[in-house]
Amino acid sequence: MPFPLPAQKPQSAHFSSGPTKKCPGWNLSRLDQTHLGRSHRAKGPKASLTSAIDRMAQLLALPDDYRLGIVPASDTGAVEMVMWSLFGQRGVDILAWESFGKTWVNDATAQLQLDDLRLFEADWGALPALDEVDFDRDVLFTYNGTTSGVRLPNCDFIPSDRKGLTIADATSACFAMDMDWNKIDIATFSWQKSLGGEGAHGVLVLSPRAVERLEGAPAPRALPKIFQLTKKGKLIEGIFRGDTINTPSMLAVADLHQALDWAEEIGGLSALMARSDESLAHVKQWVAQTPWVDFLAQDEATISNTSICLQIADRAITSLGQSEKSDFAKQMVTLLGDETVAFDIGAYRTAPAGLRIWAGPTVEPSDIALLLPWLDWAFASVKEDFLNKKGA
């Protein structure tokens, strides 16, 4: 029998983990078109790029002596730039507990073929053994596991007197999580995540320790142009003042400024983090009273407040084979999309079967609250039909 529909749909069905929902009030007509069709090297467009850099740094509350620059190829390009520029000068520890961290492991082993490499890996839902990491070495980690919903609870495991550099892939953490910049030497992200901006551009954050390393030792390999951060032994400062390595999209930059306007208007970083925390609180309360679902994260302290990953805990479904569990979750996702309730909330393709809901700052917490009864409806609807067909 059909199950009754919940009384109200979310105002927006956009819960994709990337590209993510546009900021509230976003409108294409509000984009400043002044610099479109202009050279990004011209005075006005360059000023717009420099302003975007300064505004992001201020919004993140970066220390005054940290540098922030726009680089090619999204967060992936920024991480690759760091790995190719730095790795191999000393031993490297890589922490991996979800898909993107495992990508960096593959690059370090198959592409860079590092001789002195240690891997700290964990299965879906868990963190690796943080107390075994050696910070006399360079350490790369994903601050928030976008595909597993597992985040670092804090940076307390990183010593202040470390000799190596700490590199944080923070693309779904920046602007949504409280990050201790004194413990992070290099961070990478893309503004298409927590700010809902357009993709293709990455951001690189460097501490003074990172700059000292880059200038003190040449890259231990030949670098393509888009990875080059130094020239004649000195940091290319222009990268951090609006002179991008390759041609940026000025339309994407205008879109970023609209997102930054919104973020500043609502109260800055604390307000952005509060929105994601409120969304997660709604989901936690619902999970606590809903027997068919659970977080993929095993430790409550590590549950992400942006990429919320859920697994189906109902015994009738967990007893199925992997393919059947995947089909079940996909049917829920399709049903919710057909009802224009939630788009693109399936688990990442290599993650355990389940749901992944983006709850970054641009998503309204009230929409998260309205979504939850629809998840109950979709589960009940699909379960009845799924098990009836299975038993037929």
Image (cartoon, grey):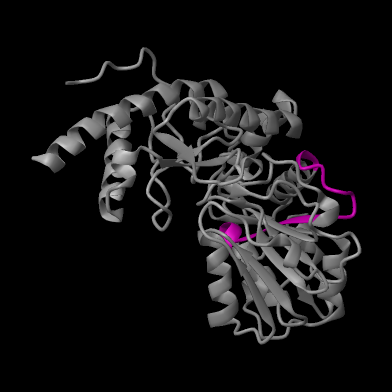
Q: Is residue 349 above or below residue 111?
A: above
Q: Position of residue 306 (x, y in %)?
A: 58, 40
| Residue at 79 percent of width and 77 percent of height | 231
Q: Position of residue 243 (x, y in %)?
A: 72, 60
Q: Is residue 157 above or below residue 172?
A: below
In what quadrant of the picture does the C terminus appear?
top left
Q: Position of residue 88 (x, y in %)?
A: 72, 82
| Residue at 51 percent of width and 55 percent of height | 124
Identify the residue at the far top of this view.
7
Q: In the shown orientation, is residue 153 left or right of residue 160?
A: left
Residue 78 visible in image: yes
Q: In the shown orientation, is residue 25 left or right of residue 46?
A: left
Residue 30 visible in image: no
Identify the residue at the far left of this view.
392
Between 90 and 372, the residue placed more toward the observer is: 372
Q: Is residue 169 above or below residue 117?
A: above
Between 242 and 120, the residue placed more toward the observer is: 120
| Residue at 36 percent of width and 37 percent of height | 314
| Residue at 57 percent of width and 60 percent of height | 97
**Total count of labels:** 0
Q: Position of residue 15 (x, y in %)?
A: 46, 35
Q: Is residue 108 above or below residue 150?
A: below
The magenta segment is 58-76
In what quadrant of the picture does the N terminus appear?
top left
Q: Looking at the rendering, which quadrant does residue 175 occupy?
A: top right
Residue 67 falls inside the magenta stretch: yes
Residue 157 falls inside the magenta stretch: no
Q: In the shown orientation, is residue 367 left or right of residue 225?
A: left
Q: Looking at the rendering, which quadrant does residue 164 occupy?
A: bottom right
